Amino acid sequence: MIPRNQCIANIKAGYLFPEIAKRRREYQAAHPDAKIISLGVGNTTEPILPHINAGLVEGARRLGTVDGYSGYQDEGSLELREKISAVFYRGKFKANEIFISDGAKCDIGRLQLLFGAGTAVAVQDPSYPVYVDGSVLIGAAGGVAPDGSGYNGITYLPCTMENNFFPDLSRIPSQCLVYFCSPNNPTGAVASKEQLNALVKTALEKDSLIVFDAAYSEYIRDPSLPKSIFEIEGARQCAVEVNSFSKSAGFTGVRLGWSVVPLELKYATGESVNADWSRVCATIFNGASNIAQAGGIAALDSEGMKEISSLTSFYLGNAKRIRDVLQKLGIQCVGGDNSPYIWAHFPGRDSWEVFSEILDKSQVITTPGAGFGPAGAGFIRFSAFGNRDAVEEACQRLCCIIV
């Protein structure tokens, strides 16, 4: 038989969220009467709101007609791309700079194909696992270091309470692929305009490229905080942005996102990153569901944007309740104001042990910070995605325990 891809062999067994699901099942089997509430995985729970849902329904209906049927749309619906440019970027991008996808996570994985094995990679630490795992799978990183400090070949940029969850940018190598997420998953921290200015300046100076994950941008309520890397001068020469309808419109199961790749963006040798991304998308991806795209078009109508604001405000209300409880318990935390995640500090504790203790005492599922990288040790992520009654009951249970 042919040999296994060593890159897959290098990746740690067990993705974070399936591991949490496994532990939940084991606990439920041992405690069959327990009513478990999840504040762990960032999966939306509320129904898609009426105007957006009507767009999905109408999209499906049209496919059953001769005039309304449509097939492959590799780069995505022209109407949707133009709406994304108008709504999120004030019309500053052409349709051929916006690529529709089946979600930001999928784009992040496919983007690795543009750079390949041997590319220097830097990530915020802690960070969403796909930044690191995707780098390992493509061969840009090796196996886990023997001391458990992370993967060989990855430059980790610690985001801690001491640096206000914004990393030391001097650690970024030259000609590096830099993954950056704001609002951040998992910490909930949001980068200021000054901080993103510094990030763009560093990328330009070091001939590096930023992959900016803005999947939670619609949770930002502070008008002084940037929602896009392209609010920063110079970003068109050094950044790609990915975004998604998953957490803003409730499309986690519908699957719809986009990437922005400016025409100005060039490799060191002068070739167009945009042209290569178009080629990659056409080669290994046949486009997002036409039904999902119809829903996306409805979401970007004025009524749809009101629904997005309503839905994200609902989850932010959950986040406030969770954060208030944690602070009353004397637990230091960040996030939960411009983000649906709360990053809670349990100094000196193993985060998987804290996860188990919270589950055992309150039957509440959380996410251990260690699953997001070395700097996640001693932290727990609480997710605000949940039904209000369940979140309020979880908060009551948490109030009754001392971790």
Image (cartoon, helix red, strand yellow):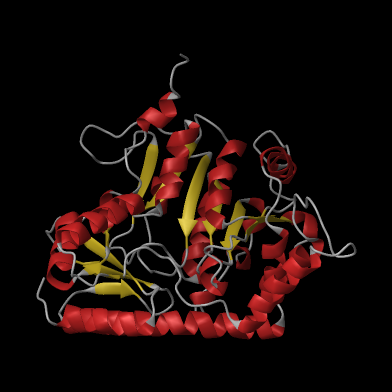
Residue 267 versus residue 351: which sits nearer the camera?
A: 351
Q: Is residue 173 visible?
A: no
Q: Is residue 337 visible?
A: yes
Residue at the extreme top of the image, as rendered: 1
Instruction: Give how far across and how far down residue 101 sits, in percent.
Output: 65, 54
Image point (40%, 85%), residue name: 317
Residue 164: name its quadrant: bottom left
Q: Is 347 placed above or below 324 here?
A: above
Task: Give the position of the C terminus as an image quadrant.
Answer: bottom left
Instruction: Give how far across and how far down residue 334 sits, in percent.
Output: 31, 73
Q: Is 293 placed above or below 238 here?
A: below
6 left or right, relative to 374: right
Residue 253 versus residue 66: which sits nearer the camera?
A: 66
Residue 195 versus residue 79: which sits nearer the camera?
A: 79
Residue at the extreme left of the image, as rendered: 402
Instruction: Give how far across and how far down residue 349 sits, in percent.
Output: 12, 59
Instruction: Give how far across and how far down residue 131 sits, in percent.
Output: 45, 47
Residue 254 versus residue 114: which sits nearer the camera?
A: 254
Q: Is 263 placed above or below 219 here?
A: above
Residue 191: name its quadrant: bottom left
